[in-house]
């Protein structure tokens, strides 16, 4: 069962703080991060500002109203960035991201040209039809994509603009950038960097957060 909360899952409380605040604190602690932009559903913008009123990152921090699609919300965040440097896009529902993973991913992005956090598949994978196994999938080639995903600002803007023109809805930023013909580089994520999706994930995250 997926989350069926009355409020956005990033607003749920986790060890006394909104879920979203945990990842913001990790990004604020990164030596590479100069400013923070929190994109929220438009109708929840005031609620988000109220929930985060005690958050003092010591760096510029702005709230932005998002769009209908994920890529629309990313575009809204890009619109308020006043530089042409780098941007790290992170899911607000991944509160257990650590500063160490963030710093390592950003360092690799600078070296490689971009970086998408991912972890290799560890389970046996098969193909099936009508509930019957029809073949094996080599898991050595399968990765679970995570965030942050780090790109030059201009590249990500171009990728989103191209997707809009082509009527494409992407599930992540890396997929949109790949459509430009740009190689997207995978860098180590973390098994702790889980996404809050199901009600039981809150209990799992309760145990992960103190170890950051």
Image (cartoon, helix red, strand yellow):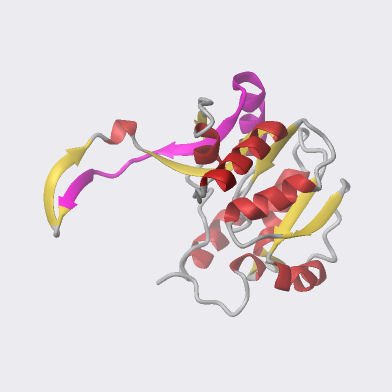
Stretch of the chain drawn in magenta: 103-128
Percent from the top left, x then y, of residue 157?
67, 39
Q: Residue at x 76, y 68 (%)?
A: 45
- Residue 121 position by quadrant: top left
Looking at the image, is 175 positioned above or below residue 38? Answer: above
Q: Residue furthest bottom?
A: 6
Percent from the top left, x then y, of residue 164?
58, 47
Q: Which residue lies furthest to the front in this view?
A: 165
Give the side of residue 66 with respect to residue 82, left or right.
left
Residue 189 seen in render:
no
Q: Is residue 97 one of those drawn in magenta?
A: no
Q: Is residue 109 one of those drawn in magenta?
A: yes
Give the side of residue 87 with respect to residue 181, left or right.
right
Give the side of residue 18 with respect to residue 112, left or right.
right
Looking at the image, is 54 positioned above or below residue 162? Answer: below
Percent from the top left, x then y, of residue 93?
59, 58
Q: Residue at x 69, y 60 (%)?
A: 66
Frontmost residue, 143 versus 206: 143
- Residue 70 position by quadrant: bottom right
Looking at the image, is 8 positioned above or below residue 188? Answer: below
Q: Quadrant of the N terminus?
A: bottom left
Q: Which residue lies furthest to the top in this view?
A: 111
> How many discs mark residues in the rendered view?
0
């Amino acid at each position: 069962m997926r989350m069926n909360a009355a409020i956005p899952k990033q607003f749920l409380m986790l060890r006394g703080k909104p879920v979203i605040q945990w990842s913001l604190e990790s990004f604020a602690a990164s030596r590479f991060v100069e400013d923070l932009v929190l994109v929220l559903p438009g109708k929840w913008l005031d609620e988000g500002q109220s929930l985060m009123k005690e958050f003092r990152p010591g760096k510029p921090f702005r709230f932005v109203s998002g769009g209908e699609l994920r890529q629309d919300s990313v575009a809204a965040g890009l619109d308020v960035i006043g530089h042409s440097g780098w941007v790290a896009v992170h899911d607000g529902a991944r509160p257990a991201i650590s500063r160490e993973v963030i710093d390592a991913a950003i360092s690799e992005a600078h070296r490689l040209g971009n970086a998408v956090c991912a972890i290799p598949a560890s389970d046996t994978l098969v193909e099936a039809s009508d509930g019957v196994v029809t073949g094996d999938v080599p898991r050595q080639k399968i990765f679970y994509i995570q965030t942050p995903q780090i790109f030059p600002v201009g590249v990500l803007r171009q990728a989103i603009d191209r997707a809009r023109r082509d009527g494409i809805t992407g599930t992540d930023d890396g997929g949109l950038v790949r459509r430009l013909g740009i190689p997207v580089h995978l860098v180590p994520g973390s098994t702790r960097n889980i996404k809050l999706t199901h009600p039981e994930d809150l209990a799992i995250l309760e145990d992960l957060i103190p170890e950051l």
